Amino acid sequence: SRKIKESMEQGSMIRRMFEQGAALRLERGGENVFDLSLGNPVVEPPAAFFAELRRLADSPEPGMHRYMPNAGYVETRAAVAAQLAEETGLAFTHDEVVMTVGAGGALNVVLKTLLDPGDEVVVFAPYFVEYLFYADNHGGSCRASINGSTKVVLINSPNNPTGVVYDAGLLARLGEIIQTKERQLGTEIFLLSDEPYRRVLFDGLEYPHVFHHHRRSIVATSHSKDLALPGERIGYIAVHPDYGDKGELMDGLIFCNRTLGFVNAPALMQRIVARLQSETVDVGEYQAKRDFLYGQLRDMRYDVVKPQGAFYMFPRSPIDDDARFVDELMEYGVLVVPGGGFGVPGHFRISYCVEDKTLAGALPGFQAAIERYA
Ligand code: PLP
């Protein structure tokens, strides 16, 4: 379709990076290319994951690979709810949880359920570029401010691409603004929190939950990063237990989980993550990489905010033309993503979820590239 051709054109930057990276590897050899462009966890899932996998393979239960209720297994939803209740102090039950095909699936199910044609989703730049396509999938569009067409305010903390965590004070102000606007406009606005990096937090930080700041709040998340399972496609949606029209909303989410074609989240993974709700990968590894890279970049005089979570950094490019600077880094074998793709030109994104030797190998390139503009 014309529409998809246009969308692919818009999203062509990452593809171009991918192709140039492949060409560079052929030309220089893989060991001389330092790919910091992808958000793929470098750590393996925790030992408890493999123990569960083995247990299920060794003693399969009859019917464990069949269709199930579209919201997912009650046992899994109850385990997620118990964990959320412990973290938030709110009375979550399995009735507020729908298991999904990753966070991407969760976001699409929520937006499908909430958006009428022409409705708007407020996003804050820099944002995860897929949000633009996800809103469009369901007849909506993204914008930077609230108006009468706003149905959803979508936030992401810890943030991709900056690694910043929204603190409770900021969330409280956001909740107040949304509620003031709802009163002024006579509308209902949902606060949708995309939080696949919720447990990838540094320096002992506690995660400030959105549920305390707006009744109409919904979490979309996954175990792609906290259990290092992005290829297994397992996540969930959680709705505020005190949201008034919860029954109708949950029915809508479950309907969309089915009719978007996922039908339900993967059965085996649901059984496994039911027992892993209090497990997390070793976040210390990511923190050590952050400390190393942040220190090095600061010494080189890059202007960069210190990440509090996730595994990305978003330094300012020493020149306004971020695409050009990214090309210059590529000349030194370093692959990163231009900030323009996240709605904030003049920056670039580094994914530091890579082997230490890849990080160390990229340093001379970062140094040489900024020296051109010293
Ligand atoms: N949201 C953000 C901000 C992400 O960075 C990602 C993946 O990188 C996703 C959503 C999608 O997560 P999942 O792989 O669980 O669908």
Image (cartoon, rainbow, N blue to C red):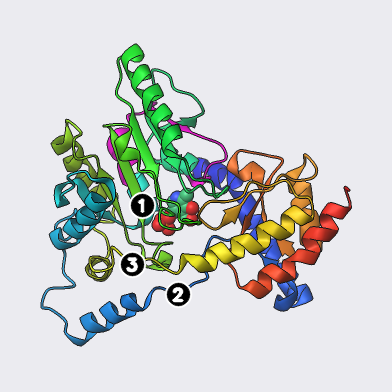
Q: Which amino acid does label 2 sit on?
A: Glu
Residue drawn at point x = 29 percent, y = 81 percent: 51
Magenta stretch: give its range: 109-130
Q: In this view, does 282 lie above or below 61?
A: above
Dot 1 and dot 3 residues touching (CB under 8 Å): no
- What is the CA distance from the residue labelled 1 to the residue labelled 3? 15 Å
List x then y, in percent, for residue 297: 73, 56
Q: In this view, does 77 lie to the left or right of 299?
A: left
Label 1 near ligand 1 (CB < 8 Å): yes
- What is the CA distance from the residue labelled 3 to the residue labelled 2? 13 Å
List x then y, in percent, for residue 79: 20, 60
| Residue on which disc 1 sits | 221
The secondary element bearing badge 2 is classed as loop
Residue drawn at point x = 58 percent, y = 66 percent: 288
| Residue on which disc 2 sits | 44
Residue 79: give its label.
none
List x then y, in percent, for residue 114: 30, 34
Residue drawn at point x = 72 percent, y = 46 percent: 303
| Residue on which disc 3 sits | 279
Name which of mark 3 and mark 2 comes first in the sequence: 2
Mark 2: give few (<14), some (14-19) or many (20+) Cα within 10 Å. few
Q: In this view, does 368 lie to the left or right of 342?
A: right
Q: Given this view, does label 1 or label 3 mark the residue nearer the observer?
A: 3
Q: Is residue 235 magenta?
A: no
Q: Is residue 68 visible?
A: no
Q: What residue type is labelled 1?
A: Thr
Name which of mark 1 and mark 2 comes first in the sequence: 2
